[in-house]
Amino acid sequence: MLELKHISYRVSTPEGELDILRDINLTIPDRELAVFTGPNGGGKTTLAKIIMGLARPTSGQVVYNGEDITELDITERSRRGISYGFQQPPRFKGITVQDLLRLAAGGEKLSKDRCCNYLTQVGLCANDYLDREVDASLSGGEVKRIEIATVLARGGEFMIFDEPEAGIDLWSFARLTETFEALHRQKSATMVIISHQERIIRLADEIIVVAGGEIAHRGGTEEIFPLILADTLGSCPVIGRKEAR
Ligand SMILES: Nc1ncnc2c1ncn2[C@@H]1O[C@H](COP(=O)(O)OP(=O)(O)OP(=O)(O)O)[C@@H](O)[C@H]1O
Ligand SMILES: [Mg+2]
């Protein structure tokens, strides 16, 4: 179980201090599929980075399976089974897709078949990619899908996917949605998927709407969808919130 307790994140900007997240309290039970959604700039990626240890909260605690992991770095959190697929994945010149998948799997001797299987799960034809370098020659959608395959290869207990749909074509997106659905059915991991896509949001056990650095709504699909629709049909949620401050 993951618990976020009174998480705040403040940065210094030339204009002064800026609150990116304010007093976030959230519990994600084991094997739940939670979807974070909400307007651009609402704080979803920042929250994911705080869970992964890529950003240190200004105040508050991150507790994982009863252990306070707030001060642990990304490597230590990774050892505890937490993994994160970046919204904008980095590229690694000189490293092939196969190397990257093996590294993700902890250096274990991942067979070619297993590597192929992970790539198939994200809609890539393995033969075309295993020996390609993860460099600038890959398209945005390809690099994004390879990143998701590395999270799958890591096989963590707590997986975070940051906008897995970004830049991905309709056919691969359908395949990816099936992969998330199957993973969730197997109940082998807790998943947080940050998404703006209705098909992914509908897979959620719980939808968490992050807006203006706060949790604006949280609950099941039936309860939250009408609220999201009301939010988006009204005035611009971002501008509205800023004016309200
Ligand atoms: N280090 C920083 N300095 C200044 N502003 C920051 C910093 N980090 C994040 N922000 C701002 O905090 C807000 C939240 O960013 P975040 O990336 O978490 O949003 P998001 O909900 O993931 O948005 P999107 O849907 O566009 O991916 C944004 O307005 C962003 O510009
Ligand atoms: Mg984001």
Image (tube, grey):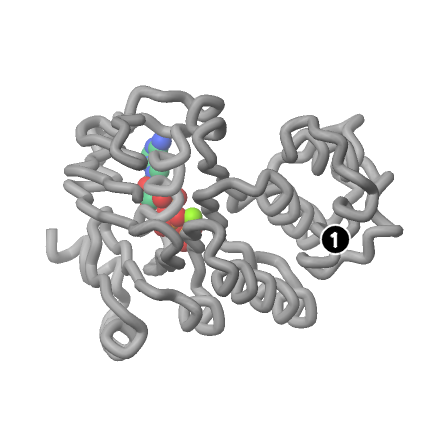
Q: How many marks?
A: 1
Q: What is the x, y in percent for residue 109?
A: 76, 31
**Quarter of image, res 207:** bottom left
Q: Which residue in the structure is indicated by mark 1?
A: 117
Q: What is the x, y in percent for residue 123?
A: 72, 61
In the displayed structure image, the side of residue 10 where residue 189 appears, left or right: right
Residue type at mark 1 is Asn
Name the residue at 64% across, 34% down.
Answer: 104
Name the residue at 11% across, 51% down.
Answer: 245
Above or below 210: residue 17: above
Q: How many residues crowd around disc 1 within 10 Å: few (fewer than 14), some, or many (20 or more)? A: some
Residue 219 versus residue 11: which sits nearer the camera?
219
Residue 131 versus residue 157: which sits nearer the camera?
157
Name the residue at 51% across, 60% down.
Answer: 186
In the displayed structure image, the side of residue 18 where residue 152 appears, left or right: right
Does residue 228 appear in this view? Answer: no
Q: What is the x, y in percent for residue 112?
A: 83, 43
Does residue 40 appear in this view? Answer: yes
